[in-house]
Structures are given as C-alpha cells and as structure tokens.
Image (spheres, rainbow, N blue to C red):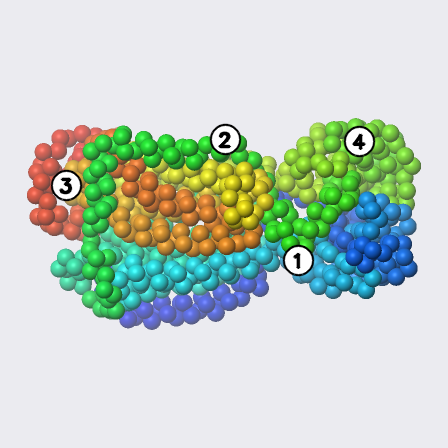
Amino acid sequence: MLRRIAELALHRPRALLVLSLIAVVAMGAVGFGAFGKLQAGGFEDPDAPSSRARTLIADKFGGEDNLVLLVRADGGSASLKSAPVREAGEKLTKELRESEQVSHVSSYWDAGGSALTSRDGSQALVLAHVKGDSSQVADRTEEITDEWSGDQGPVEVRAGGGAALNNDISGQVSKDLAVAESIAVPLTLVLLVVAFGSFVAALLPLAIGLIAILGTFAELFVLGSITDVSVFSVNLTTALGLGLGIDYGLLIVSRFRERLSEGDEVGDALRTTVTTAGRTIAFSAATVVAALAALLLFPPFFLRSFAYAGIGVVAIAALAALIVVPALLAVLGHRVNKGRLPWAEAVRRPDAPVWGRLARTVMRRPVLTALPVLAVLLLAASPLLGARFGMPDERVLPEDAQSRQVSSVLEKEFPGSSTEAAQVVTTAGVPRDALDAYAGRISRLDGVARVEASSGLHVDGKAAPAGRAQAALGTADAELINVVPEAGSTAEERQDVVREVRDLEAPGTGEALVGGRDAQLVDTKASIGDRLPGAIGMVVGSTFVLLFLFTGSVLQPLRALVLNAVSLTASIGAMVWIFQEGHLSSVLGFTEMPMDTSMTVLMFCIVFGLSMDYEVFVTSRIKELHDGGADNATAVTRGLSRTGRIVTMAAGLLAVSFFAFATSEISFLQMFGLGSGLAILIDAVAVRGVLVPAAMRLLGRGAWYAPRVLRRLHGRVGLEESGGRPGTEPGRYDSQQPEAGKAREQRPRGETQGEAQAPTGAGV
C-alpha cells in the first residue's frame, strides 16, 4: 500500500493536493461549529452514587447548594442587622428566589437563618442551587456573578461554591492556554526553521499540523452533536496536532532530503521515503492511538474527550504525512531545500556524529554507563511511593481568585458551616423513629460536628427539636440529611466520613445515597482507580502486539515497555516532589496539594504514546540496518546516528509546547506541562541515548529473539516494506559498510528474527 501511495504521489501529485485542499476547507467549515458543541465540567462518573444522589436531590429538594454568595456589611464596619444591610440582603435573596435559573435558595435573612453568619457577625451567606447541565450551570453562574458580585450599596458580595469555582478554573485555564500558545507557537516556528535549515522544509510539518487540527475540530463537531465532549479537548487538539506534525514532518522530510543528498532521483527518493519513513509513521501512529484509546475506559467524559481528540488528531496527522506530504515533495523535488540558511548543510547531514559516538561509548561499557542514569531516574521516581491523589479544588487557583477567597473565608470564619456538608438522600420515605436512630448513628462518627434531619438536629447522638429549615428536609417519599463535618477537618478526614456513612445500614426500605463534593471526590478516585489496571493492561498489551508486528521480536517490545516505564515513573515522581510536596512552589506560585487524578492519568497516556513514538523512530532504523546485514552493535550505532538528531529535535520542539504551560496560574496545568515536557526530554536523551544502546548491547544477538511459532506468525502477518529489504536502500548499505556483508554471511542460524532466516522483504 505504501508503494502504491508513493506511485500515486509521483504520478498524480497535483490531483492529490487539490482533493486534499477541498477536504481541508470542508473540515475547517464543519469544525468551526465544534466550539458550540463542547461542554465544561465532566470530571465525575455519571453512574457513581454521588451523581445519583445529586440527581435525586435535584428532583426532590431543588438540588445541592452549588453557589455561595458571601455578603459582607459595608466592608465589615456596619452590622448585618442594620436597616440598609438588611434591605440589601433581603433584596438579593428575593431576586434569586424569583429567578428561573436557580432553586433551593437559603439565606441568613430567612427566618431561622442565623446559622449562616460568621464568627464576628459581619458576614453572611446566601446559598442557592443553579439549575441545568454543566454548560448551562456555567453560563447561569457567570450571569449571576456578573450581576451581584462587587459593591452592592451597603454590602459587598463575592461568589464561591462549586459552580463559581468551576467557572473560575475554566476561565483561568482559557486565559493561561492562550498565553501558553502565544509563547509556544512562535517559538516553535523559529525552532523549526533552525532545525531544518530551510524555510520551505520547515513549512511541511506545519501543513501536517494544520490539517490534523482542522480535521479533528470537524470530528469533535460530529461527536459533540452525539455525546458529551469537554471543551478542553480543543487545547489537546492544537498542542498534539502541532507536535505530531513536527514529529512526522521531521521524519519524512529528513529521510527524503537524506536520499536526495546521497544521489537518488526524486522518484526513487520519494519511493524509499514513503516505504520506510511511511511505515514508521504508520506504526508510530498506531502506538499513540493505542495509548490514548485507554482513556475511553474511564467514565468521566473529561477523560474520554481527550481520547476522542487524541485519536482523531493522530490518525489525521498520519494520513496527512502519508498522502499530502509525499504529493508536496513530488511537486517540490529538490526545491524542498529552498530558502537555505547558513547552517543548512550541517542539519542536512544524514548522520549525527555526536549520537554515534555516544552509542559506541555506551555499547563498549553498557553497565558502567547505564547504571548512573538508571539510578538517577529511579531516584526521581521514588516520591511516587508517597503519592496521594485528589481532584481539583480551590487550591489550584491563584490566591486572588474570588472563589478561592470565599472558600478561605468559609473555612476560617464559618466553623461548622453546612457548605462542606455531605448530603445523604434516601430513595423512599423513612419513619421518624428509624430516621432519628440513623441520624444519631451518623452524629456519633468521628469527624462529624452535627447532623441535620427533618426529625431534628443531632449532635454526638443527642437530638434537639427540628427548626423550620430542618423540617423542610423531609418529604413523603424521600429524606435529605446534612452531615456537617467538624471545623478545620481535612479533605481526607471528610472523605473518611463519607465512607463510614456509606457503611451504615440505610434507614427504612429504600437506599441511602451520599452526595456532596467529598462524596464526588471519593467516587471519582474509585472510578478511575478501578479502571486503571485495565487501562494499563490495554496500553501494555496493544503496544506489545504492535511492536512485535513491527520488529518480529518478543524482547524488543519488553525492552521498550520497561524503559518507557522507567522514564514515565521518573517524570511523574518528579511532579509528586514538586507539586505534592511543595518544592518550587515559591518559584511557580502554586499551593501544594495531592496530585490531580485525572491529569496524572492523562499525562501517563499522552507521554506513553509519545515515548513509543520515538521508540518506533529509533527501532525502525536499527531494524532496517539489522535486516540489511549489519551486526547488532553496528545497527544500533548507525541507527542512533541516523535518528538521534530527528528524535531530539522533535522532542525539544514538543517540550517547548508543554513547558509553556508552566506560565499558567492553574497548578494542575503547570503539573501537566512540566511533567509531560520533562518526560519527553528524559525519553529522548537518557533513554534513547543511553539506556537503549546499553540494553541492546546486553541483549546481544538475543535482542531479536522470537519463539519459532511466533516467527512463523510474524512471517504471515508482520508488516514490512515491499520491494526489497526494508529501508536498507538495496546495495547501498553493503557497499558503504563491507563488513556488513561479511557479518551477514557469517551469522550463525538461531532463533532470532533476522538471524533464523534471510532478511525478509518482498516475500512477506
């Protein structure tokens, strides 16, 4: 197929380019509508008990309180009981109740609302539930906040709670990503020109990236019309589209220029490029897709959306690199080197002597050179042993964010506030005696300050009569019970309370569902944690199969997976050290907190896929040389010499995009950007430059081993280039390296791929 693509690009390049242009214009027109289809939120499991509780509370009691309006009397100098302040508070409460956008409003200025006041009596709360799905809640919260926040005559109003917090995070993320892209994109363009040494050649990766981004936007429009898709998938689309455009563009353009520099005609150079670099790109794309597909296993649509976007952008980038770029190269020919810069000859050289010397040094003393690198990476990974995982809360925001300031005031000035309460809702009515007994048991749990139920107020097993507010918590077919935590309790302690409440036998005949923010956190971590082994197994299994089909060896996939795990754990461990333990917090300006569960999983899948991307780049060239007759040491040395510059340039350019996220004021974006960029650089330099040649030297001839039955299987289904030995440019390698022919003749027969039989190619 790759040979046919090359012939089509050579004989019908302009027709291919015209059809591609029409497709790109159509995708751009469709993709423009994607932004109206995407949604905010999506961090929770929709089938979790807390999600079911939220739905039931909305149906029976008007919904959970997701908006907190903190009202302060005239900067704190006036009393909440003064006439002007009281009138302003009553007006705020009345207009919120009359709004169709909210329900279940409770206020300090209601009868019996005295508990919603601060220690010093200068601040009060108005609580409400903003109705709608995640996008509607975001829009409505923004309208309410814009209308009521700030000075309102004798009072100052600030917005907090879950809805305002999510809006602040989304708004800050949008601003930060715009800043990051404004830094990364121009810098990447400059570095591309430097890397290629030619303006024309540097534009080809951008063409791949542009096609991938527009095509994926069209895909997101279609998917967003069918299911929930997160708005954050747009940012992954642009970052990954540009990054893969650079990766695939560097590989295919560098191979084409290499063949031209060695005397090939344009047609021969293009055929060799498409059948060698094209095969590498196809397998590379498959490994990245396999890693990102694991995100589909997780229930929160926030994570699934990154799979939608990631798989789309990888597939479209690969198609652009395999179809559009060959047509462009056929039209350009030698003009691909137009616009040369003074250093063009240096970067056009096929070999990178530094990488060749490094590989030879490592292979002479593999243990001595690899152990220090391995020790450093394992030391960087060690903080993972103490890792704790959570979900975003107000601490991810900068300290001047309004919703974070409100959360801080609630914690300090409203001890025992019901805003942190877990909410237990029953699916059926409960007799009063059973309700009293159940609420009493909950009130005796460690970490519980009080329990509010329709039957009364319970503290440490003792009950007091219900007030008007508590009486409204019961209906004929459901009961709502507020479990208020002790003042100053930590998130971990509140989550323990949720688990202990769930362990209690439900009252009456129905089921008792626990909701609230801490219950959502417990459920989300459990939902992701339960599926994580399956996701890892899916990634490892699919990657092993793909690399076996690529190499014909069972040891090469194992070696790749082990080394990839080392670099990945080292980078995530470093993020634990920085973000959980608080190192560099003064430099980056964040508040230390547990690792963000969703972003850690996302980083794992993306970095794993990109690392395998570079694995395929390097292994492809090593295998070509090995299949062409080179001994293992020569194949590794020359393979790294030929691919080292491409991998490091691609990794460096992609790392720039990720490191730009460090400018963010959202800590989980900083973590994702720094962790991903660091992992890519570790993989490109430490793993590809040192650990791969060391492992290949230690494995020796066994590096290409496969059992006889698997060798026969690979002979039937393994994918090789057609038309001669794969990628060896027939006759070239042996003529340049006479010892290779001798090595091939003297190689003993054994059970290793490429050694048990003559090099495969046209016969497969």
Query: Which residue in the protein does label 4 denote?
Result: 443
* Of residues 325 and 489, the one drawn nearer to the viewer in this rendering: 489
Q: Report the residue at 45% width, 60% height from top.
A: 183
Query: Which residue in the protein does label 2 denote?
Result: 385
Q: Earlier in the sequence, mark 3 or mark 2?
A: 2
Query: Which residue in the protein does label 3 denote?
Result: 629
Q: Report the residue at 37% width, 43% height from top.
A: 682
Q: Is residue 635 above or below residue 160?
A: above
Q: Position of residue 216 (x, y in %)?
A: 45, 59
Mark toward the viewer: 2 or 4: 2
Q: Is residue 119 above or below residue 145?
A: above
Residue type marked 2: Leu
> In what element is the residue under mark 1?
helix
Residue type marked 3: Gly
Q: Earlier in the sequence, mark 4 or mark 1?
A: 1
- Relative placement, left or right, of 557 versus 486 is left
Q: Report the residue at 15% width, 30% height from top.
A: 749
Mark 3 residue crowding within 10 angstroms, few (<14) / some (14–19) / many (20+): many
Mark 4 residue crowding within 10 angstroms, few (<14) / some (14–19) / many (20+): many
Q: Report the residue at 49% width, 65% height from top.
A: 31
Residue type marked 1: Ala
Figure quadrant of residue 596: top right
Asked whether residue 111 is in view, the answer is yes
